[in-house]
Image (cartoon, rainbow, N blue to C red):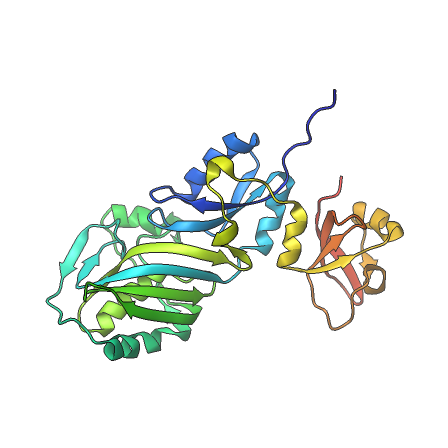
Amino acid sequence: MTDEPPPDGLAIIDKPGEWTSHDVVAKCRGIFGTRKVGHAGTLDPMATGVLVLGVGRSTKLLTFLSGLSKTYEGTVRLGVETDSLDADGEVTATHDMAPPTASEVAAAAAPLTGDILQVPPMVSAIKVDGKRLHQLAREGKQVHRDPRPVTVSRFDLSPTDDPMVWNASVECSSGTYVRVLAADLGARLGGGAHLAALRRTSVGPFSISEAEPMGTAGIHPPSEISRVLEAVTVDDTTEAVVRNGRVISRGELGVTDDSSGPWAVLGGTGVLLAVYQAHRGDTVKPAVVLAP
């Protein structure tokens, strides 16, 4: 009787509300039977939806997933501000705002789209002088946060039955805080707002339609990284070299001069052998080797 191979691949989880991303990782370590579990892109505890996990050796692939664009569906409540900018926070201010029209909301959202600078919230995991902002916030401290460049490709808002609650659809770059968009929208409408609910519907090509609850989630093969990276399939001779993690020429890998990589390198059976990246001159080198 042979031992089962250790789990290895990507899991696409539908994160429940009130769980931190770290909570999900800790739970999935038990579910999958390995300590080697990590996530690509934190979701706030209040939020639900797509959380991509790397399992086993595939935790090395998470670096190629962290910068992917995201899409979200949520709701924005006007007239109420919170310290965390979302429904998990304490109310810090209320505003006697007149219900805005759809054109007023669209006009307020327009400057919050495109390439913008966004000030991170105090309640976040960003570090300043070695301390996370949420730790400083719990101590009652406010510190300067430099604005960060982000891209908001879409920030669409539609009315609900409550004139002070608006549905939001967002497509944005990695590092964008949707709760900051909600708060900034409220400020531009002459008062304040917070994010009342949020669901992440995609991380790059990984969508909510394929996300699974933690208890029933399967592990997709490491070759799923080829949905994100340019994939090349090598012959048996090159496969043997790749398995040893050797620096090789672009010609050996089979990539053109105008291709910048990184590349998911697949064997003839479709198994992910490695991820290669550009090196000196016309050579390429392994960033990650997964083949045993």
In which quadrant is the C terminus drawn?
top right
Q: Is residue 48 left or right of residue 35?
A: left
Q: Nearer the viewer, residue 239 or 282?
A: 239
Residue at the extreme front of the image, as rendered: 161
Residue 9 appears at what percent x and percent y? 62, 43
Is any atom of residue 18 visible in this view?
yes
Residue 25 appears at what percent x and percent y? 48, 39
Image position of 243 with respect to 255: above or below: above
At a point 45% along the width and 46% down the height, the residue shown is 14
At a point 56% along the width and 29% down the height, the residue shown is 33
Residue 270 appears at what percent x and percent y? 75, 50
Q: Is residue 22 left or right of residue 283?
A: left
At a point 37% along the width and 60% down the height, the residue shown is 73
Residue at the extreme right of the image, as rendered: 237
> Total marks drawn?
0
Residue at the extreme top of the image, as rendered: 1
Q: Nearer the viewer, residue 286 or 254?
A: 254
Q: Is residue 188 left or right of residue 232?
A: left
Q: Nearer the viewer, residue 230 or 269?
A: 269
In which quadrant is the N terminus drawn?
top right
Residue 234 appears at what percent x and percent y? 82, 55
Is any atom of residue 120 visible in this view?
no
At a point 32% along the width and 58% down the height, the residue shown is 121
